[in-house]
Image (spheres, rainbow, N blue to C red):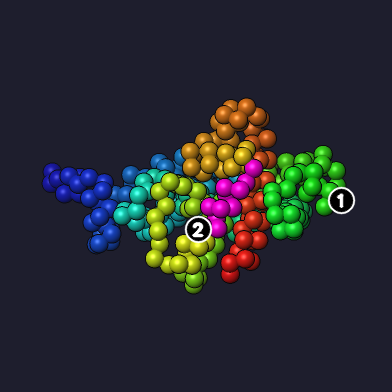
Amino acid sequence: MVENPLQRMTEDELWSQYKNSRDPAIRDAFIRQYAPLVKYVAGKVAASMPNTVEFEDLVGFGVFGLLDAIEKFDPDKNVKFKTYAVTRIRGAIFDELRSIDWVPRSVRQKTKEIEDAVVSLESKLGRPVSDQEIASSMGVSEDDFLKTMLKISSTSVLSLNDVWYAGDDADKISIGESIESPSSMNPDTTVEREEVKRVIVQAISELPEKEKKVLVLYYYEDLTLKEIGQVLEVTESRVSQLHTKAILRLRAKLTNLRKGIF
């Protein structure tokens, strides 16, 4: 049996060679090696989805994210491929879920109303706003507001994979890319891209402490909502609610900050 020369190479050597050659054999080797990662990410996403969402469908969506990660990964940056790929796989799954539009219209409408309220209040006050302030601006009680947030968190698809543009349409940054490895972001040659990254990092740093912890633990430390609940000593549903509030607040902050720089 003839030995495959690729088997004698380290992963770093394979990435270096693939970057230069785009050898299909190396790409296929990476697909086989990281296929279990797709199932792992799909399983995490499935845990927070309704029973109507099939696990195998999520795996299928995630495969496209893995392929995208393999093509776009830069081995010269100080980020592990697994960390990078998790974000791309999760993003591909969420993108497909959004495209099939299974979220009820009423939930989307409430989500937009809350996001608009946060944009307006934080722009006016210049600081993070409380649940009570958001509820008051919407003309509802704080209890009703929290019930709405719980409903949104259990049915909506909100994530850090929203895309922000720097320069032209070909140069895209997801919010998740800026938090997946906060200590290892490298300078980019595009000034506009660096400015968008700065805005995203600034917006994340200004979130309330618990919401920021949820984002870091979920997207960077890769913990499940249940595991985060154990760390923060709150229920899983409360973590889900904190996650949703963090995303809504972050998107509102980015909307306001982008108005100031673009």
Residue 235's label in the rendered image is none
Q: In the displayed orientation, state which residue is furthest to the left.
A: 2
Q: Amino acid at mark 1?
A: Gly
Q: In the displayed orientation, state which residue is furthest to the bottom.
A: 168
Of the pair 169 and 38, the residue shown nearer to us = 169
Q: Answer with left or right where residue 108 lies relative to residue 170.
A: right
In the rendered image, residue 218 lying in the magenta stretch gets the answer: no
Q: Earlier in the sequence, mark 2 or mark 1?
A: 1
Q: Residue at x 48, y 42 (%)?
A: 220
Q: Give SS at disc 2.
A: helix
Q: Residue at x 36, y 55 (%)?
A: 73
Q: Badge 1 local density, few (<14 within 10 Å), some, or many (20+)?
A: few
Residue 138, position in %: x, y? Answer: 83, 52
| Pointer 2 with pointer 1, Cβ within 8 A | no
In the rendered image, residue 203 lying in the magenta stretch gets the answer: yes
Magenta residue span: 198-208
Residue 108, position in %: x, y? Answer: 72, 55
